[in-house]
Structure formats: C-alpha cells, structure tokens
Image (spheres, rainbow, N blue to C red):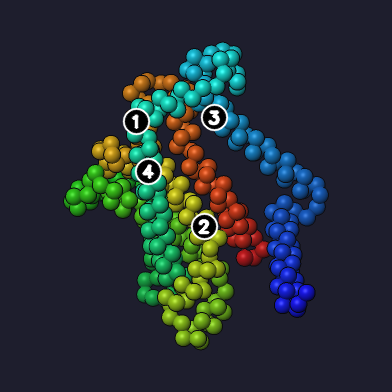
C-alpha cells in the first residue's frame, strides 16, 4: 500500500475522531458531565417527547377514522371498524389541495430566499461596518421585533392596493420579506465571529463584500440553516396575511384553502385532523431533513463561549 493511500486514510480517521470528540464535548455541555445529571436530562427529554408525540399520534390515528368512530365513546386509538382513507379522499376531492400546497411551497421558498438575501447583508453591516446612525438602526431593529404584525395589516394592504398588487403572488410574498428578528439573530452570530479574520482578509485586500461572501457566510452556515427553517415554517403557516391579500382560489395557500373546505361541511373532527396532517406533513419532512443543522446551530451558539 502506497504512502499516498495511507495518508488520506489516516486523515479521515483523524477527522472522524475529532468530530466524535466534538460531539462528546457538546453532549457534556448540554447534559452535564456526571451520570446523574445525564440520566435526569435524558428522562426529562423522554417525558417531553412523549408529551409532544401522544397528541400527534392521536391526531394521526383520528384522521384515518370515520366520523362515527372519531366521536364514539369510549374513545379508542384503534377504531372498531378499522382505519380508512375516507377523510383524505374527501379532502382532496372537495378542494384544490394540490394547487394550494404548490402555492404554499412557492411562497415559503421565495420568502425564505429573499428574506435571507435581505437580512444577512443588513446584519453584516450592523455587525462589521462603522457608519453614522448604526446604533440608532440597531435600536430601531430591536424595537421593530416587539411590534405586533397585526398593526401593520391595514397600511400594508393599502400599499398593495396602491401598487395594484392585490390578488397576486407579489402581494403575498413582499410584506413577509422583512423580519427584524432574523436580522438581529444573524447580527448577534456575526458579532461572535473573531475580528482577527476581518483583519487578515483586509490585509489581503478583501472588500467588505468579499469579506461577507468568503469569510462570514461560510462560517455562518449553521445559523443560516436554522434561520431558513424558521422563516420557511413561519411563511408556510402564515394564515392571516395570505387570507387578506388574496381572494382568488387559484392563489390561496394551504392554511387559507383548507379551512374554506372544512367550513363548507361543518365541524367534523376526523376531517379536521386529516387536513391538519396534510398541512403539517411538509413541515415534518423539512425538520427531518434538516434536523442536523438545527441541532448544530443550537450546539454551536451560546455554548462554550462560541
């Protein structure tokens, strides 16, 4: 075996060992170093997971029941007549669920992309650049976080009417692009990046834009992933603004369209659970795909002085 083959193999083993030590360090920071604190922490996590999973399991089981089984007493997780897809067939037959799901996905993706495209440079400027009014701008951003979004509905709608954007995708997307909380979170993360990296990049002749694109952003992938998931879920679940900005059924998002179908048929528990499962399924998939990034962002921010 040649030296060229042994060297990459040893490097990969060393990298795996380093990652294992880092995971052990993070577990120690989160759960504690002793056996008793770790057992207590794991027990608490199991209890909290059960508290969260039991209602979800009950809702999922109810969505596969008939309405008669859903309201029959005594309540049972497994219905006597067996599970059925009747509620899902009725839901998809009663409305354009596929179109509404596409609209929700399109709006959520575009809101996520453009929100980060606006928030990340703004956070970088507040964190790394010195300019007149910087402190006032940071204070204004923090103050905007506590402003209830409901207060902005009327002026935003009037602005959409003036721009002739009502009943368009732009009317649904544009008002959701400004998220002061994302700017503040990214700004706090950028503050923790060592300033020595800036000095080294500036010595090499890097501009602010190059510093942002080649130094800050690559180091910020965990927090960017977490912020992306937060923005995506917020945009996906947004009901009030899409409900106000659109009246065309072809532009409705899933949270707006499904209640219209349910209200047409009255209150049915099994149908409500089926619609909730349809609306929640994409969010569960997103979390399962990106949970590693979420855990990493939590573990690498605010722990161990990082």
| Tag 4 secondary structure | helix
User: In this rendering, does residue 298 appear at all?
Assistant: no
- Number of numbered markers: 4
Q: Is residue 222 left or right of residue 263?
A: right
Give the answer, above or below, for where 154 lies relative to 275.
below
Q: Earlier in the sequence, mark 4 or mark 3?
A: 3
| Tag 2 secondary structure | helix
Crowd around label 4: few <14 · some 14–19 · many ≥20 (10 Å): some
| Tag 1 secondary structure | loop
Q: Is residue 254 left or right of residue 29?
A: left
Crowd around label 3: few <14 · some 14–19 · many ≥20 (10 Å): some
Which corner quadrant of the image does residue 247 belong to?
Answer: top left
Instruction: Estimate the x, y position of residue 141 in percent, counting from the top left.
Output: 40, 60
- C-alpha distance separating marks 2 and 1: 33 Å
- C-alpha distance separating marks 1 and 3: 21 Å
- C-alpha distance separating marks 3 and 2: 28 Å
Instruction: Estimate the x, y position of residue 85 in percent, counting from the top left.
Output: 49, 25
Q: Earlier in the sequence, mark 4 or mark 2?
A: 4
Residue furthest right as drawn: 35
Q: Is residue 268 left or right of residue 243?
A: right
The numbered mark at residue 225 is 2
> Of 305 and 298, which appears nearest the observer?
298
């Amino acid at each position: 075996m040649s030296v060229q083959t042994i060297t990459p193999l040893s490097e990969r083993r060393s990298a795996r060992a380093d990652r294992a030590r880092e995971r052990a360090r993070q577990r120690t920071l989160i759960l504690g170093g002793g056996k008793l604190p770790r057992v207590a922490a794991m027990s608490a996590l199991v209890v909290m997971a059960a508290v969260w999973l039991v209602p979800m399991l009950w809702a999922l089981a109810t969505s596969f029941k008939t309405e008669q089984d859903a309201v029959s007493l005594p309540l049972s997780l497994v219905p006597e007549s067996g599970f059925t897809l009747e509620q899902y067939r009725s839901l998809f037959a009663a409305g354009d669920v596929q179109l509404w799901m596409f609209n929700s996905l399109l709006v959520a993706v575009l809101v996520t992309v453009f929100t980060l495209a606006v928030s990340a440079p703004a956070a970088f400027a507040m964190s790394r650049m010195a300019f007149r009014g910087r402190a006032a701008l940071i204070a204004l951003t923090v103050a905007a976080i506590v402003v209830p979004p409901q207060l902005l509905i009327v002026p935003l709608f009037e602005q959409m009417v003036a721009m002739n954007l009502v009943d368009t995708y732009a009317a649904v997307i544009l008002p959701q692009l400004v998220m002061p909380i994302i700017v503040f979170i990214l700004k706090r993360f950028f503050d923790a990046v060592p300033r020595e990296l800036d000095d080294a990049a500036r010595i090499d002749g890097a501009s602010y834009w190059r510093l942002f694109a080649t130094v800050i952003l690559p180091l910020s992938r965990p927090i960017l992933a977490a912020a992306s998931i937060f923005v995506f879920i917020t945009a996906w679940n947004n009901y009030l603004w899409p409900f106000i900005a659109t009246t065309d059924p072809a532009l409705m998002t899933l949270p707006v369209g499904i209640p219209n179908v349910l209200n047409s048929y009255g209150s049915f528990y099994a149908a409500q659970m089926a619609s909730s499962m349809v609306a929640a399924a994409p969010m569960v998939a997103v979390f399962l795909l990106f949970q590693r990034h979420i855990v990493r962002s939590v573990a690498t921010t605010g722990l161990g002085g990082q």
